[in-house]
Image (tube, grey):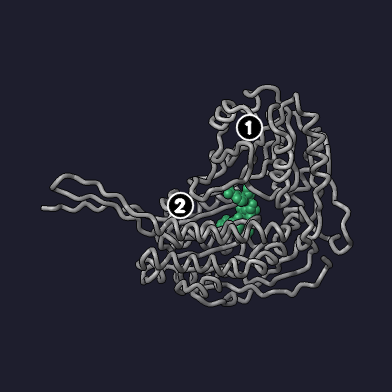
Amino acid sequence: MTNTKVKVREVKLYIDGEYVESSNGSTFEVKNPATQEVIAQVHEATKEDVDRACRAARRAFEEGPWRTMSPAERSSKIRRMAEIIIERKEELARLEALDVGKPYPVALEKEIPRAAHNLKFFADFMEQQGGEVYPMGEEYLNYTRYEPVGVAALITPWNLPFMLTTWKLGPCLATGNTAVIKPAEVTPLTVSLLGEIAKEAGIPDGVVNVVQGFGPNSAGEFMTTHPEVDLISFTGETSTGKAIMKNGADSLKKVSFELGGKAANIIFEDANLDKAVPTSIQAAFMNSGQVCLAGSRILVQRSIFSEFVERFKKAASELKVGDPQDTQTNMGPVVSEEHYQKVTSYLGIAEEEDSELVYGGKRPDLPEYLNKGYYLEPTIFIQENPQARICQEEIFGPVVTLIPFDMEEEALEIANSTEYGLNGVIWTDNLQRAHRVSHDVRAGTIWVNCWFVRDLRAPFGGFKKSGIGREGGHHSLEFFSEAKNICIALK
Ligand code: NDP
């Protein structure tokens, strides 16, 4: 792959079935993180634009037909969106690679198909749902209905823009709600296309709206304080979750938060290292470590520590860091200059904390056209103190810490010592230990001898500061609907 000049796209807002410019003409630039070339001029939604989007969503909700149409008809339109995504998967994957800096094959083979699956899964799932009937003898009949809540604000981060937005949009639409979506300002490209995809699939105008902009005092805040918004599904940083909760408090909005993580990946001495090493490499460096579920703290039993370190280091050195558009690339840059500064600041912090640098820690050697990219080698530290900042804080980049431990109890104490509780990973061949440790790690998802395996029927969310609520399967039905009880006197 060579450095082909990319055209600068104009990204507009999608409001009430039309792509429109910002009402005050203001735009911002988006850059390719591999080269710093400008790839898009994005219209920034003003308060008036967000207001129009929220009102359009409200009108589409109240007036129908989306809310009142049969689940079968609604689901067939959502399934059509999924089909269009598959038909356009190469284009969407190219854009995701360009915008986020992730390797094109990962976007093409994993994330874009998963985005289509998110929509199809929830269309199928919600079509199958009914209510409950509670017989009360001859006097009364008691039953429930699950009704849509109203207008949902769907706010997503930059690491998996299209996949995470469809994860929210699928259940939101399939339960009959309408949506105002805001992607992260650094990665607006693929999500902006959801407007035309919805239109082509026959989704009525106003049901899906996409606004662009920033967080505080911009589109994000305007959405989360808007009186027409009934519920907020947000994925992003824990600190942003706190701000959104405060902003939504006055109008008592229903919230679902998927927030930060700092997963412990625990390798016991009886683990199968032929599987544990390559999977731990994936868990540490996939998407340049910019994954909320990343196994960013690797806890290794001391008896196998040296062997693990050697094998892990060798596997890291074999990762090909390079141009995201190149099909041979395993790892691209991090997403933006601001994020690069944050991630690389941890190199200095690690040094101050006397961490041992095992591998990486600098810019990789790359072809000249990538010289301005936000690249960092896969970086591995050893740190004996689990309270060190690199063991506690979410770095969200290609930086992983290896921590030795002696006993199972110690591993558990370290695993549970952060403020996060999104997920955990356990490697052992001992069945009792696998169950025991799974029960005692305080996190929403535990993977034993695997990582990143998802079934969309299962609950997804975090303990502690990693989130509020669960989504997935009937958990999404509960969040995106209001359960109503109807009691009828029969005599
Ligand atoms: P941020 O919290 O910075 O941003 C997420 C979204 O919220 C963006 O669209 C952002 O807009 C918007 N936003 C920011 N401030 C506000 C505000 N005050 N009101 C409303 N919206 C606001 O997260 P990042 O984009 O940096 O993503 C990385 C984070 O996401 C990590 O902490 C990661 O762990 C977490 N994450 C969690 C997942 C999970 O399932 N638990 C999955 C994936 C990521 P803008 O970008 O314009 O500032």
Compared to 230, does 475 lie above or below?
A: above
Kindly state the secondary structure of the residue where label 2 is placed. Answer: helix
Q: Is residue 145 visible?
A: yes
Compared with 153, 136 (above or below) is: above
In the rendered image, residue 489, in percent from the top left (x then y), is placed at 15, 52
- The residue sitting at 54% across, 42% down in the picture is 462
Which percent across, then down, holds residue 184?
62, 60
* In the image: residue 421, left or right of residue 7: left
Q: Which amino acid does the dot numbered 1 rest on?
A: Ala
Which of label 1 and label 2 is nearer to you? 2
Q: Earlier in the sequence, mark 1 or mark 2?
A: 1
Image quarter of the N terminus: bottom right
Q: Residue at x 44, y 61 (%)?
A: 174
Q: Which residue is mark 1?
A: 415
Instruction: Sort mark 1 into few (<14), some (14-19) or many (20+) by Cα contacts within 10 Å.
Output: many
Residue closest to the far left: 491
Residue 176 falls in which quadrant of the image?
A: bottom left
Q: Position of residue 300 (x, y in %)?
A: 72, 30
Q: Position of residue 30 (x, y in %)?
A: 71, 66
Q: Which mark is residue 476?
A: 2
| Left or right of residue 405, residue 165 in this image | left
The reply to whether the residue tagged 2 has its Cβ within 8 angstroms of ligand 1 is no
Ligand 1 visible in quadrant: bottom right
Three-letter residue code for mark 2: Ser
The quadrant in which residue 384 appears is: top right
Distance from mark 1 CB to nearest ligand 1 atom below 8 Å: no
Q: Is residue 408 left or right of residue 7?
A: left
Kind of element beneath mark 1: helix
- Marks 1 and 2 sit apart, C-alpha to C-alpha, by 28 Å
In depth, the one of 370 and 153 nearer the eye is 370
Q: Can residue 239 be spotted in the picture?
A: no
Q: Is residue 386 left or right of residue 353?
A: left
